[in-house]
Image: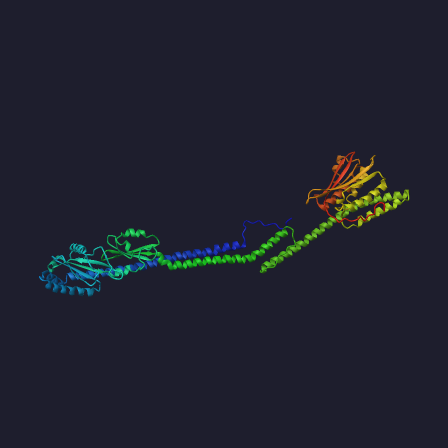
Amino acid sequence: MKLLTPLKRGNNYSIASRHLEFFLLFITLPVLVILILFGFFFRHEIVKIAKNQREITLMQHASGIDVELKSISIIASSLIHNTALMDRSRAFIDAKTPEQRYLVSSDLERIFNTYSILSRQLIGFYVIFQGEDTPFVSRNYAGIILSQEEIEAYIAAADGSRGIVSFPDNLSFSHGQKSGWYITSLAVSPPQTAYTSGLRTLIVPFVINPLMDFIRQNNSGGNSQGSGSDYFLIGRNGTVLASNDTNIIGSGFSAVENSYKKPYVIIKTPVESSAWTLAEAIDVRSLTRPVDTILYILYFSVIVIVLFFIRYNTFFFARILHPLKLLISKMEAVGNGDFSVRAESGSFIELNKISESFNYMVEKISRLTEDIKKEQKERIRIEIEALRYQLNPHFLCNALNAIRMMAIITKNDAIRKMSSALMLITEDTLAREDTVCSLEHELHILDNYVYIMKVRYGDTFELIKDVDASLLHLGVPSLILQPLVENAILHGFHGLSRPGVIVVSASVAGEDGGKTLIVSVKDNGGGMPAEVLADVFNSRRAGSRGFSRIGLYNVRRNIILSYGSAYGAEAASYPGEGTVITLRLPVQETERHESRLMNREG
């Protein structure tokens, strides 16, 4: 029977798992949420600030390009109204000889050199005279070379708006230097009133230095989708005129813009004088990379901390839970009836106190259990002794009465033998401390008892012992057979006309682990009616015809108290034929020994 009953509980969690669960839920998760929100808002602010800064920078580049274009426009406008240029252009047309033209060309070169120095630009001048197909060219940079088709296109554009500087919607790229130059041109024709000057159109090609500074910001080049920003100069018709990615020059910017997906942001600003547009495609990852690096380090740190905590949690609670598990196993052992277990001391004061309390409890339970067992055993022993003393006086009264009668009738040696047998039986019964003896010893006692009964009743009955010698060492309760034989002699043979026979037999039934010793006492007496047989073991009162049920009740009660309800006694009776009392006993090994009793001849 278990002394400990498990408590009912809804959840079955270990301390370590619950501690880890709370750590992850209330510490790790909030920290991760805060880091994620911090990263999100911080990245958003960085992108916002960087976008504003890039917009300001883009406007500065656009302003620089616009100033450059306006500066060259002013130079071109001043040239078509320069009187010296007008005079020299007329002289160039009117010159008759090459020498004259050479002299005029020198004057023109000096005028254009003066403007080149003033502009501080890589610039060139193409002068188209009235009635002349070949232009006069002056330039300070060899890379500024216009083809005949370009010259004609500029002349046509300038003639359409005389007196107004015309900006064609195109650029050219010169490879004359380390990384080349973006070159554009403007054209202007004198108004109608200036035709007398001989100057038809002035074309001014020049390098746009601010544009070069803008395009060269990203040295990685190409639409790398993650290497930084890409830069574009967009024409009035939406075509890409210049870019750090040379592969998309000439493409429509709308298609280029659609090719950029997140995380790119595109900003634009106009170039006022030329109606061009500057654009920048910003890779947000290039802006947030330092923050992302810090966040990755923080995430990695959190993961390391969590892993470290899991390891710590496992190690720390293992030192706590292992002693607790051992204590629980010892509690289960105590619940199963093993009171020899004891909890050992550990490294923690609290666990040691629990162990001490557990050991004290087990020790106390063990002592109480032993006291209860001793008390129960003593109670059973006293009850058995009481049953024994109920049997003994009954027998002694009859025996002593027989001795008294024999002493009256005759003084014979039989009296001595009978007295000796009675004394030995009485001594063995009252002096024995144990309640179990060998079957051999019990049969010796039975022989002496039968001798006394034959002295009383004569040779009217016979005792037959049908017991194999291999069973004589098995244990049986002492004086367990005497009441059965007594009932057979006194009540079974009462009024019997034939000689009485009592047969005592023994056998072992069952297999190993479940063997039972079967002892039966059979007589050929008159038997019992069915109503008497049904109640023969259930009453301590005397039955009909003087049949005593005290002995049978005590025999069965003795067996049950000693060995449990699995064992006991059974009775079968056949009126006119006899009665059989069968005892079922456990197989008990006892040391074989010689009987202390003298046989009836002694």
> Front-most of 456 and 17?
456
> Front-most of 68 and 130?
130
Q: Position of residue 357 (x, y in %)?
A: 62, 57
Visible in this render: residue 454?
A: yes
Q: Position of residue 99 (x, y in %)?
A: 10, 64
Query: Does residue 570 lie above or below 313 as drawn?
Result: above
Visible in this render: residue 541?
A: no
Q: Which of the 4 image quadrants contains residue 486?
A: top right
Q: Residue furthest top?
A: 576
Figure label count = 0
> Front-most of 29 and 466?
466
Q: Position of residue 422 (x, y in %)?
A: 84, 46
Q: Is residue 41 left or right of residue 273?
A: right
Q: Residue furthest left?
A: 96
Q: Is residue 99 left or right of residue 228?
A: left
> Front-most of 281 and 505?
505
Query: Does residue 170 lie above or below 473 as drawn?
Result: below
Q: Which of the 4 image quadrants contains residue 215?
A: bottom left
Q: Which of the 4 image quadrants contains residue 548?
A: top right
Q: Is residue 268 left or right of residue 4?
A: left
Q: Position of residue 434 (x, y in %)?
A: 76, 50
Query: Does residue 318 lie above or below 543 as drawn?
Result: below
Q: Is residue 439 left or right of residue 148?
A: right
Q: How is the image coloured?
A: rainbow
Image point 31% across, 51% down: which residue?
Answer: 259
